[in-house]
Image (spheres, grey):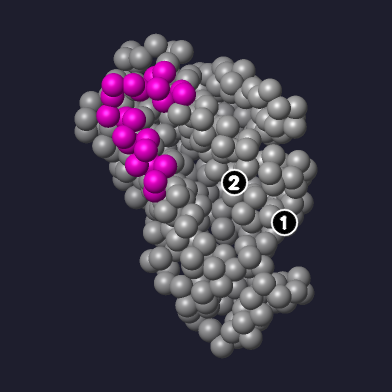
Amino acid sequence: MLDLWKRYPQVSEQLNDVNSLIQKLMISDNPAIQSLLNDCARQQGKMLRPGFFLLFSQLTATPAEKSDRLIKIAASLEILHQATLIHDDIIDDSPLRRGAITLQAKYGKDTAVYAGDLLFTVFFQLLIETMNGTHYLKINADAMQQLLRGELSQMAARFQQQQPVTAYLENIRGKTAALFRLACLEGAYFGGSDSTTIELAGEIGENIGMAFQIFDDILDYSSSTGVLRKPVLEDVAQGVYTLPLLLAYQTAPTEFKDLLDKRQHITKSEIRQVAHLVRKHQGVNQAKKLAQSFTEKAAEKISLLPDSPVTSEISQLAQKLLKRTF
């Protein structure tokens, strides 16, 4: 997945260092957990959070921090993200992620829980090494709390057919956008930017995160398992009603009701009917417009950043994330 970063050579090189560090830190005396961690290290994702962190750290001509500290902070962001993914797959009982069997499906829930917990401890260790004595310890704690609140709110809203769009947006602001915000905010701060730029970075990260999650949910209705590399529409079976469904439901609630009333007993054939109705009632197109609106908000803030090649790269990447197929 580092192909995404080939257009950004400096970030790509740094991300290789981030990956090397993560592999060194993923160590356990327990053979089962070590095997799981080895698989986790090999299942490289898009590295968006550490990548955005490193991009924003380059907004100043001469970064204020040494490279090794930046690499450690970037690694902390990816490790936190990986820990949440492991726990998400356990809760959702997901069989696939990125085309591969999930760690919880391969190694069992017990091993996966302990491995996820271990990654949280590694995350905390990196924070102590890089941020002790700064207010960014609290900022990280607040971001983790937002992540948890977003996940808990999503869980509480399962199978709620009349969930307001505002509630969905608030959930993803926590479970996804908070970590993007943290990455961009930290990148600007530890890169030595001024306070105005740091504040802009946080706002940009949040809007990019909102657009990213909405588009991720759109792909569930517009892609295939082969392309998306995860079971499409599994959210419907689990009662997680995302933006395309919520918007389409508002247009024609009676057409959805009998199908969604089946809750967890809905069949694959009936889920395909739901997907057809979502597309029929323009749920995907409406969601795309909202994702684009968050990208435009990010673009407005990006235009206020210091004029530099890095600013242009941030803008290009934000737009590119709305054109991906997985």
Which residue: 48% across, 19% down? 71
- The residue pinned by badge 2 equals 87
Place of residue 218 in the rendered image (x, y in percent of width and height, measured from the top left): 57, 59
Residue nearest the observer in this picture, 192 or 115 = 115
Q: In this rendering, which labeled residue sits more in front, label 2 or label 1?
A: 2
Which residues, given as a range, are shown in magenta? 125-146
Q: Is residue 295 left or right of residue 228?
A: left
Q: Amino acid at mark 2?
A: His
Circle 2 packing at 10 Å, graded few (<14), some (14-19), many (20+), is many
Is the C-beta separation of discs 2 and 1 under 8 Å?
no
Which residue: 42% across, 53% down? 149
Does dot 2 land on a helix, a strand or a loop? Answer: helix
Place of residue 59 in the rendered image (x, y in percent of width and height, measured from the top left): 35, 24
Magenta-colored stretch includes residue 212: no
Tell which circle, 2 or 1, labels the residue nearer the N-terminal end.
2
Place of residue 236 in the rendered image (x, y in percent of width and height, measured from the top left): 63, 67
Q: Amino acid at mark 1?
A: Pro
Q: Main secondary structure of the magenta part?
A: helix
